[in-house]
Image (cartoon, helix red, strand yellow):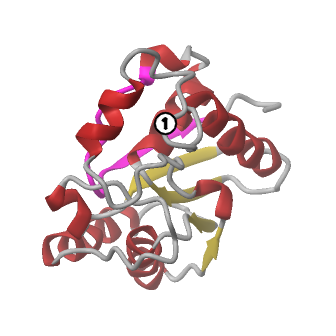
Amino acid sequence: MRIIGLRHGQSTYNLLGLCNDDPARPVDLTGVGVAQAEAAARRLVAEPIEAIFASPLLRARRTAEIVGRKIGVDVVIEPRLADIRSGYEGRPVAEYLAAIAHDPVHACAAGGESLRDYQRRVDGFLDRLAHRPLRCVLLVAHEETLRMLDAHYRRCRLGEVAGRAFANAEPYVFQSASGN
């Protein structure tokens, strides 16, 4: 299965450097973010995408809807693709990163989930997805989600992907091995 991972377009909280993992908080795309999503849609129109799964957070849903309209595929909201529960909702990302810096893989900050916990959540979705008869899917989610995709499909340790940067609305391709 070919997996295309797409981080949402630029959000208002990206500009402010704030955490958002609560789907009830309406953190939307900026004008730049909408343009990024539209550009991604134009790039993805040639891909044989059969399904789009998106995080329930507004910025990812809106990005997925923009792409879905362009390529003619409906969006399925997948709660397991929601961003990592940081415990720092509405607070600076820098504070969250400082709180987990001593152990970025296992640390839980302010009642949030660790990167290892998040990996289990995302891997649970990927394992179920692997049993679906799909050849190409688009997952629209978050930078941390793309890190999990990278670790899953390259079969590398979380420490190798922790902190790896993924650009807004830039498609990244991951290929599962046959039998996965």
- From the viewer's perspective, is residue 4 above or below residue 108? below
| Residue 139, image x, y percentages | 54, 57
- From the viewer's perspective, is residue 104 above or below residue 47? above
Q: Which residue is drawn at 29% across and 70% down?
A: 37
Q: Residue at x 50, y 53 (%)?
A: 83
Question: Toward the viewer: 18 or 152?
Answer: 18
Tell me the crowding category of disc 1: few under 14, some 14 to 19, or many 20 or more residues within 10 angstroms, Cα based. some
Q: Which residues, given as a range, are shown in magenta?
A: 161-175
Where residue 101 sits, quadrant-wise, is top left
Q: Split into 4 quadrants, where in the image is the N terminus?
A: top right
| Residue 68, image x, y percentages | 48, 78
Q: Which residue is drawn at 21% across and 69% down?
A: 12
| Overall secondary structure of the magenta section | loop
Q: How many marks?
A: 1
Q: Which residue bears the numbered disc 1?
A: 109
Q: Is residue 74 left or right of residue 17?
A: right
Q: Which residue is drawn at 25% across and 49% down?
A: 92
Q: Is mark 1 on a helix, strand or loop?
A: loop
Question: Toward the viewer: 128 or 83?
Answer: 83
Where residue 165 sits, quadrant-wise, is top left
Question: Toward the viewer: 118 or 51?
Answer: 118
In this view, the residue farthest toward the front is 110
Is residue 171 in view?
yes
Q: Split into 4 quadrants, where in the image is the C terminus?
A: top right
Is residue 164 in view?
no
Q: Which amino acid does label 1 sit on?
A: Ala
| Residue 10, image x, y percentages | 23, 63
- From the viewer's perspective, is residue 84 above or below residue 22? above
Q: Confirm whether the magenta stretch covers residue 39.
A: no
